[in-house]
Amino acid sequence: MNWRDRFWVSFLLSAVAWMTGCEGGRVGKSGQPEKLTFWTPEVEPERLAIQAALTERFTIETGIEVEVAPVEESELTSRIVAAAAADALPDVLFVPLDLVITLSENEILDTAAATAAIAALGEETFAAGPLTLVSVEDTFAAVPADGWGQMLLYRQDLFAENNLAAPKTWEAILAAAQTLHNAPKLWSIEVGTDPTQAYTQQVFEQFALSNGCRLVDNSGQVNLSTPQCVNVLEFYKQLVSQFSPPGDIYWLQTRQDFQAGITSMIVWSPFILDELADLRDEAPVTAELDPPLHKRVGIVTAFSGPNSSPVQWGQVNYFGIASGAPVEAQNLVAFLLAEENYLDWLAMAPEGKFPLRPQFVDGWKQLEIGVDRKAKVKDLYSDEVIDILINGVDNFDRWGFAAGKGACIGSIYGTQTVAQILRRYLDGEIATAAVAAQQMTDSVRRLEGCD
């Protein structure tokens, strides 16, 4: 979903609540329905075919038809708003974390139904991190479906040659950057600096989380002026000014440079896993290495600064059950996450759909990734690497969601406020980290949903 589409979501959903009399969704249905509706932004033909096959199985088992309605990610917010206003919500929605809390607060999602579905499957069978992100008082706003966590990728072979510790701490990251830097032949690290790209916010947020820099302080107020946040800005600038290429850096350049062998550390999503193995022609590995690049890569999921324990920026997708949906909607969600079906769901894009129920990890290893060529996850990456990837799920964290500021996060990404101030600080237009941190605080507090 485009971040700009999310910018007004809180306002629009509040308006919907007013137009519908603030009654909290549709009138409940009685009896077994003939059909359920399921909205999905997984609209690629191959993925739709998998979802159609899964729901057909549900129909055979229950006698209830399921209409799978593809909704483009960029249209998801506006379609939900319109459907809520018309009392025509689907029964189940596949939605990203960024929308879950706002939809729940506006009673578009039924938290009791989601909690019941989780209980039926066993709360203990889910990774803790994704559940915590949508915890609302004593309930859960939606049911975790799949997700991925941001990773710090590094050239493990270069680290070993130089007796460097894995970059699990700021200290280790800086030591490696100082040792390996040999520009322009080898840049030691690349992080996001382009203020127009969500990637920059994501990477900066990962570093912020790693040092205990939170969006919301203990009093419930947005506060990016803490010593921890000032420290993040100073460290980020050191990495950019001393060890990264000049210019506006975003995901495309970092991937190209890492796959060309001219940078030793980048922050990326696991969607790069098939590209590192040269399975996608449009994103080739151009470094001539033997053994190949993907066998030389080390992965750190959660790293830490001096003021925090390790955390990982995570993106989670959820099954949301709409208010007023019949109990069979809970059954559909439980069916999709059940033993005989969940791996088929994850197979749509295994590199970006990590199992959020740990008992499915061994099956996930057997799934194939790639576009122009295919290979099983287990044949490309060692059990050690896979364990690092999957265990990171428990450390998933994000700014603001646990504090009920989901709408604020949408505004931050939609306006690119933090990234713009970050860029001005990196360029020297803002003299000190303390001034930049205060400007971030003041600017964010003025955004929709951040007061």
Image (cartoon, rainbow, N blue to C red):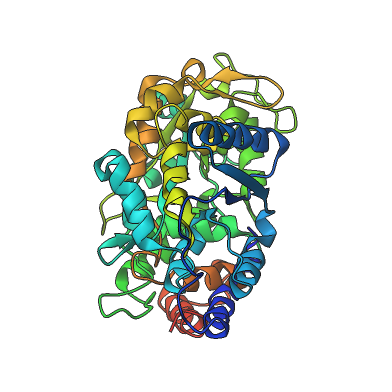
**Nearer to us in this view, 3 or 192:** 3
**Nearer to us in this view, 363 or 436:** 363
**Nearer to us in this view, 171 or 227:** 227
Q: Is residue 401 left or right of residue 366?
A: left
Residue 315 appears in the rendering: no
Residue at the image position 42 percent from the left and 72 percent from the top: 105
Query: Outermost residue, right direction?
Result: 282
**Nearer to us in this view, 15 or 149:** 15
Is residue 310 depicted above or below 186 in this figure? below
Location of residue 110 in the rendering, given as x and y in whole percent from the top left corner: 41, 63
Residue at the image position 28 percent from the left and 47 percent from the top: 119
Q: Is residue 94 left or right of residue 301?
A: right
Location of residue 236 in the rendering, given as x and y in whole percent from the top left corner: 46, 59
Q: Quadrant of the N terminus?
A: bottom right
Q: Quadrant of the C terminus?
A: bottom left
Q: Quadrant of residue 113?
A: bottom left
Location of residue 429 in the rendering, given as x and y in whole percent from the top left corner: 58, 76
Q: Quadrant of residue 290?
A: top right
Residue at the image position 69 percent from the left and 54 percent from the top: 72
| Number of marks in picture | 0
Q: Quadrant of residue 205?
A: bottom left
Is residue 58 depicted above or below 83 in this figure? above
Is residue 260 depicted above or below 72 in this figure? above
Residue 386 appears in the rendering: yes
Is residue 114 depicted above or below 371 in this figure? below
Q: Is residue 444 left or right of residue 389?
A: right
Location of residue 10 in the rendering, given as x and y in whole percent from the top left corner: 53, 76
